[in-house]
Image (tube, helix red, strand yellow):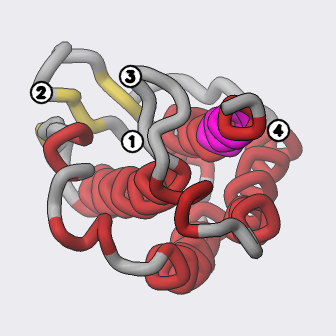
């Protein structure tokens, strides 16, 4: 097992950021036009809609990694090709689909995080791509920051669209 990195207050702050992400995301994209949602205003970056769908996919993958870490001894956690996922047909669904799922998913994810005791926070899984060990503490911080990074990416994309 790894060592504790964060205080319970720090962990709760990360959990709260995860809890609030769906509402922040929904507020940012509410009322956008199809053009704003689906135009790649920034070269090499996803559209707003792709970002929304990606956040759901990525957070589901992390949720499943968390569950495996909590229920298996040092599971190997395999990567996925996020750019390939972004080309699949489900990314053409209305973003309301991903947002509705994200609300439900985050409620479950937060519930698990809130239930963890100290030994569970430091259980480990191993990332297949790098061999690095990762803990639930790593996941809560990483994905609190991940969601906020995509909020920023969406803001940058929309700002670029205003200048187009």
Q: Nearest to the eye among marks 4 and 2: give it.
A: 2
Q: Is residue 136 above or below residue 141?
A: below
Q: Is residue 85 above or below residue 154?
A: below
Q: Nearest to the eye among marks 1 and 2: give it.
A: 2
Magenta-colored span: 149-158
Q: State how far apart marks 1 and 3 are (Cα).
A: 36 Å
Residue drawn at (77%, 52%) of the image: 17
Q: Which residue is mark 2?
A: 128
Where does the image place residue 78, in percent across and percent down from the top left? 13, 39
| Of the image marks 4 and 3, the number of the one nearer the N terminus | 4
| Of the image marks 1 and 4, the number of the one nearer the N terminus | 4
Q: Which residue is mark 3?
A: 44
Secondary structure found at label 1 = loop
Which of 12 and 154 lies nearest the eye of the viewer? 154
| Of the image marks 2 and 3, the number of the one nearer the N terminus | 3
Which of 115 and 85 lies nearest the eye of the viewer? 85
**Any magenta on residue 141?**
no
Q: State how far apart marks 1 and 2 are (Cα).
A: 16 Å
Q: State how far apart marks 1 and 4 are (Cα).
A: 18 Å
Residue 75, located in which quarter of the rendered image? top left
Seen in the image, is 145 located left or right of residue 146?
right
């Amino acid at each position: 097992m790894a060592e504790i990195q964060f205080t319970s207050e720090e962990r709760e702050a990360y959990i709260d950021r995860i809890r609030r992400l769906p509402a922040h995301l929904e507020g940012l994209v509410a009322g956008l036009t199809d053009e704003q949602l689906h135009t790649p205003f920034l070269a090499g970056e996803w559209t707003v809609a792709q970002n929304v769908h990606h956040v759901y996919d990525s957070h589901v993958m992390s949720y499943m990694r968390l569950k495996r870490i909590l229920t298996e001894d040092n599971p190997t956690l395999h990567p996925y090709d996020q750019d390939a996922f972004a080309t699949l047909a489900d990314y053409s669904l209305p973003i309301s689909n991903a947002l509705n799922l994200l609300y439900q998913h985050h409620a479950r994810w937060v519930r698990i995080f809130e239930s963890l005791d100290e030994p569970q926070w430091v259980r480990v899984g191993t990332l297949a791509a790098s061999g690095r060990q990762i803990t639930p503490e790593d996941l809560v911080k990483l994905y609190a920051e991940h969601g906020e990074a995509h909020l920023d990416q969406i803001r940058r994309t929309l700002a670029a669209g205003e200048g187009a």
